[in-house]
Image: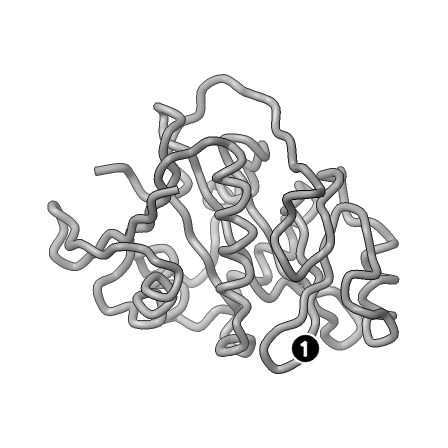
Amino acid sequence: MPKPLGIVPRKGAISISLDPRQAPAGGNSLNKLGTGPQPSEVAAMSSIQKQPQGALEGDHWIESLRDGTRVLVRPLKPQDRAMEEEFIRRLSPEARRFRFLGNFKEPDKAMLDRLMHVDYVHDMAFVALAHDNGHLREVGVSRYSATDDGKQCECAVTVADDWRHRGLAVLLMHHLIHVARQQKLTRMFSIDDINNEPMRELATYLGFKRELHPDDPRSVVYSLAL
């Protein structure tokens, strides 16, 4: 059974090609990965209510959620470390336990190092950003980490407690699944707490199959053939 996300060792590297013609439906094309937070992202969010959906192009998408709220979705960047740390800190104790399969109060340096290690090939992550009191805030993140054989990947998705029930987790997973298929991965899986009902509902909706973890009666494994 693969280890939990974030501790799978990496080997080698291959190139990634995110074809704008194959972008997930409902958003803008991803033409480049970018190297850091861009002023255009802040401007995009500031004018988001003035823009028709699909009007922005570049290294991000503007997406509408079920309630009409719009978010900016893009790949996680090294410069997002502070936002990622704040995002984890703001999660409820239950949300942190479900996401990391353990209890803790503060993310330590080693955890953040693992989460921020994204090479866009073996490791991929998308963040959803929204304005909150005048600054861009991370409100959701999805990620995968490939296994050593390069055929499978472990995934995880987390949404801020106050942004749940809007369809954001589904949106972030669609982006993640799309890239995993582009990378020719054959299977995506997630190891979760058996009591994590929101994940069970999400996995069922996305077509993941569910089975009990063979080595841990407190956990289940969801898997999706890609």
Q: Which residue is mark 1?
A: 69
Q: Is residue 199 above or below residue 192?
A: below
Tell me the residue at 46%/57% (across/down): 157
Pointer 1: residues within 10 angstroms few (<14), some, or many (20+)? few
Q: Residue at x 59, y 55 (%)?
A: 84
Circle 1: residue type: Thr
State how the image is colored.
one colour
Image height of 37 relative to 148, above or below: below
Which residue is found at the position 30% from the left and 66% from the top? 200
Q: Please give the count of numbered marks on the rendered protein.
A: 1
Image quarter of the C terminus: top left
Which part of the image, by quadrant, shows the N terminus?
Answer: top left
* Above or below 210: residue 1: above
Q: Which one is in front, 40 or 175?
A: 175
Q: Nearer the viewer, residue 21 or 96?
A: 21
- Residue 14, image x, y percentages: 56, 21
Q: Residue at x 52, y 48 (%)?
A: 176
Check the image and name the residue furthest to the top.
Answer: 12
| SS at circle 1 | loop
Q: Quadrant of residue 192?
A: bottom left
- Which residue occupies the extreme front position in the image? 21
Q: Residue 218 location in percent, x, y? A: 16, 59
Q: Nearer the viewer, residue 209 or 102?
A: 209
Residue 56 lies, in percent from the top left, at 83, 57
Q: Position of residue 25 (x, y in %)?
A: 62, 57
